[in-house]
Image (cartoon, helix red, strand yellow):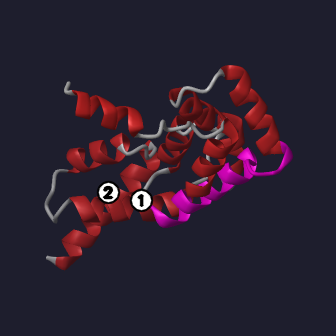
Amino acid sequence: MSKEQEAARQARPCRVQPSCKAKAVEFLARSDQSIRRLSDKLSRKGYGEDEIEETIQWLQSKRFIQEEEGCRRRFEFLYHDSSYSVRQIVAKLQQQGYDRDMIRECIPDDTDEREYAVAMKVVRRRFKAGAEQQKMLQHLYMKGFDYDTARNAVEDLRLEWDEDI
């Protein structure tokens, strides 16, 4: 490195890492975070466990992070605006760090009609008339739909296709 390059490098100001609280608030401003996910992100940024724990407690005291409410909002969004089965939604939320019991509290008592409608939507989007029944069933099982829902959706769709012919 030449003397000029060395001088230019030393003249640049050093970047100061923002405080753990500031970084946590920045993450929360983008989207709801579970405590586990937020802790993981802060840890990857190089903050210590004690500092992270203190930040989490501060965020909870200021009501910046409310895990139950965030879980409910995410569940409602995925439940109403997506083609995911309830099992897929539960798995997705668990991956995001929400507790299984907290997620289960969000699940409505009667999901059968919604699951059936979503299964029909998934099969219609993926398959054309005349597709193999077994392949359609396998696809729905892979997407997290239970046996009865998948079977009913595939049978009804096949009847629909037979009427169109």
Classify residue 72 as left or right of residue 145.
right
Residue furthest to the front = 3
Asked if 40 appears above or below 64 in the picture, the reply is above
Rate crowding at label 2 as few (under 14), some (14 to 19) or many (20 or more) other CA atoms within 10 Å: many
- The answer to which quarter of the image holds residue 142 is top left
Image point (24%, 34%), residue name? 4
- Tag in front: 1 or 2: 1
Residues drawn in magenta: 61-82
Which residue in the structure is indicated by mark 1? 83
Q: Position of residue 76 (x, y in %)?
A: 61, 60
Q: Position of residue 59 (x, y in %)?
A: 77, 44
- Could you say whether the residue bearing mark 2 is in a helix, strand or loop? helix
For image coordinates 15% across by 56% down, the residue present is 131
Looking at the image, which is closer to me, 70 or 25? 25
Number of callouts in the render?
A: 2
Can residue 128 be seen here? Answer: yes
On screen, residue 75 versus residue 57, left or right, reads left
Residues packed near mark 1 inside 10 Å, few (<14), some (14 to 19) or many (20 plus): some
Residue type highlighted by circle 2 = Val
Q: Amino acid at mark 1?
A: Ser
Residue at (81%, 40%) from the top-left corner? 58
User: Which quadrant of the rendered structure holds the C terminus?
Assistant: bottom left
**Residue 95 location (% of width, % of height):** 51, 36
